[in-house]
Amino acid sequence: MERTIQKKLSVGGGSWVTVDVYGEPDAPGLVVVPGVMSDAHAWSRVAGTIDAWPSVVVVNRRGRAASGPLTMSYSLRTEVEDLGVVLDEFAGTRALFGWSYGGLIALLAADDRPIPQVIAYEPVMRPFGRHALPDLKRAEEKADWDRCVEIVNRQISGFSAAHVEELRADHDGWATLRRLSGPLYAELGALNAAPPPDAMARLAAQVDLVIGRFNRGTAPYGTSFDTVRQHVAHARVHELPGQGHLAHVQAPAELGRLLNKLVVL
């Protein structure tokens, strides 16, 4: 499926979001919500693999070019309301898919309105990454984006120093990570400031939670996944073999095929 249009949607308060639309723009389909350290472009290969829905709408959340700023009033609720604007624009959306922080946003959106299906890949919720907030705050105040990338990979994701050096060796990739780290502190802070809900996705007819097999039962993503499961009692659980948190980067075709299999008609 190829990208057909890009739209800019006002979300109020002096900000906006852009969305990349693949397939038939007027046909109800799948809406994709990326997470932290990601943008719509990073999901283009996954979107190109999906063919179970006639359209795929990838949200470029605020804080990323060419979407608008986070603004001073930013919170997790802001993200849910932004997604509501997208869903209003693409009336009849058949399914929501969210990755990581985007998975949490998608699950919470299904508390506000009926949604036929919500799919979330390794959604995270508080107290995810809270221990790293002081270091991220200091790095942001200094505009030290290299340090922000190091913190998210080492202190939050738990990758090795050698892994970070491999990332740094890819100059274009590292530049992208530096750019995407701009809203990191605010987003992680918003995630941890939001009171934990008693339940999520209460208005979703079907919920599918997906975890990479490498992360099953391990911190931080597997343990956060287990916490989310406790709040979505009616969800079906699926594993993606041979993958961890970054399946959209490392195995976009496999992830796209899994989403095709999960479609509810």
Image (tube, rainbow, N blue to C red):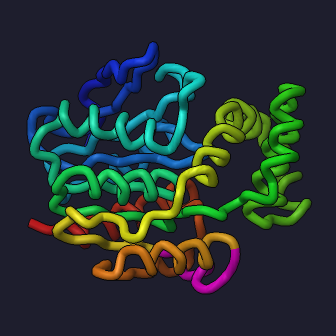
Q: Is residue 246 above or below residue 76?
A: below
Q: Quadrant of residue 148?
A: top right
Q: Is residue 124 left or right of residue 61?
A: right
Residue drawn where x is 40% and y is 64% of the image: 120
Q: Which residue is situated farthest in the top direction here?
A: 14
Q: Position of residue 131 (x, y in %)?
A: 80, 59
Residue drawn where x is 47% and y is 23% of the image: 67
Q: Position of residue 97 (x, y in %)?
A: 34, 56
Q: Position of residue 76 (x, y in %)?
A: 50, 44
Q: Which residue is situated farthest in the bottom direction here?
A: 217
Q: Quadrant of residue 23?
A: top left
Q: Is residue 233 above or below residue 144?
A: below
Q: Position of residue 112 (x, y in %)?
A: 26, 51
Q: Is residue 214 magenta?
A: yes
Q: Quadrant of the N terminus?
A: top left
Q: Quadrant of the C terminus?
A: bottom left
Q: Is residue 137 magenta?
A: no
Q: Is residue 35 left or right of residue 136?
A: left
Q: Is residue 194 left or right of residue 108?
A: right
Q: Is residue 25 above or below residue 256?
A: above
Q: Quadrant of residue 198?
A: bottom left
Nearer-the-camera pick, 83 or 209: 83
Residue drawn where x is 18% and y is 56% of the image: 115
The boundaries of the magenta stretch are 211-219
Could you tell me how many numbered marks the image carries?
Answer: 0
Residue drawn where x is 21% and y is 71% of the image: 206
